[in-house]
Amino acid sequence: MERKISLNDVRKAVDEAYEMVKSVKEGEVDPRNEGADAGQMGITVVLADGTVINKGDTDVRVPMGSIVRVPLSSILFSQNSRDEVVKKSGQCPCHKLQHKPHHLPVSAHTVRAFSAIEPTGDPESKWNIYENRMIDLMGSAPQLDSRVYTTVKKQIEEDDTANRLAADGYYLYDDAKIALDLAAKAESMTASTAQLAMMGATIAADGVNPSTGKIVFDGENAKYIVALMAAKGPHKMNGPWLVSTGLPAKASFGGTILGVYPGVMAIAAYGAELNPARVSVKAARAIRYIMQKLDLSVFGSANVSIVKD
């Protein structure tokens, strides 16, 4: 079955979502994102062909948080086979029972992902690979928020995170201090909804940046990246999120959510205030409205295309 949706209908859904949620005052700003303007709201949709729809504060840069695992997974799938990534993500080669520590200053999964990037023991090379991948995906460079980075590094030190990971048997593929610092730096990098949506559209377009035309990664890996987004979606909202939106996504403590619809588009939305699950109230409601208004779901059987009027 094929479904054709007009570009005007997409624009209308974005406009309606923005008007519906822009004045919502609910939730709290994450302490790491102190000083963020709770009144700001932005939505960006980028189609797989590069068409851009912006509404609101789409140039505001905020910390990427756990969204960094999207580009990280693209690197891991470039350096490893699918089965190797699955093994490194969960079934690690350790001999004792491992536990994922909770309430860390940075995501344990992000730390492990950086530890798994080659080359081992070379933080500068790891970072260069990551930064270049980010630029290629977005078509522009994210920026480091040094205040957030300093705050997170201090939290890691006070939390004794490296020893907590070791005590819980949480396996890493490189030195814990290297992986922790890279994770802290990555999660403190800032990007706008315009940048994030272009990154998502590059994944939706099977690894080809629709703005620059650059082939960023092997298109075969796009489905694996989106699958990980679906499996590791917005924290504590994964099942309800996928049912209510039908859109694999990742969320940031900075207040952004990035969703990818393979072959069709990417949506990024921003609102600084977070709900108890640490997901942006405004962004979640906006994306949910857009997907339901357009009656879209990646789990549907229809072959969807967006046509220009």
Image (cartoon, rainbow, N blue to C red):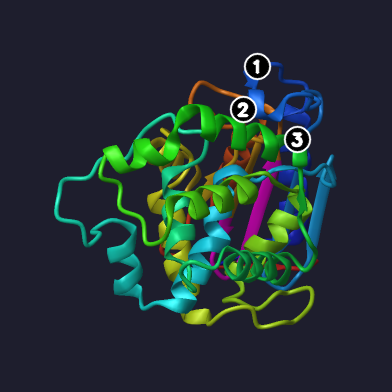
Res 12 seen here: yes
Q: Which of marks 2 and 1 is nearer the N terminus?
A: 1
Q: Which percent across, then down, holds residue 224?
A: 42, 68
Residue 268 belongs to magenta span: yes
Three-letter amino acid code at the position of disc 1: Glu
Could you say which disc has been placed on residue 88 in the image?
none
Magenta region: 260-269
**Mark 2 = which residue?**
281
Marks 1 and 2: in contact by CB < 8 Å? Answer: yes
**Mark 1 = which residue?**
26
Write the residue at 57% across / 76% down: 206
Determine whether the residue tagged by mark 3 lies in a helix, strand or loop.
Answer: helix
Q: In which quarter of the image is the C terminus?
A: bottom right
Three-letter amino acid code at the position of disc 3: Arg
Is 140 situated above or below 79? above
Residue 18 belongs to magenta span: no
Magenta region, main secondary structure: strand
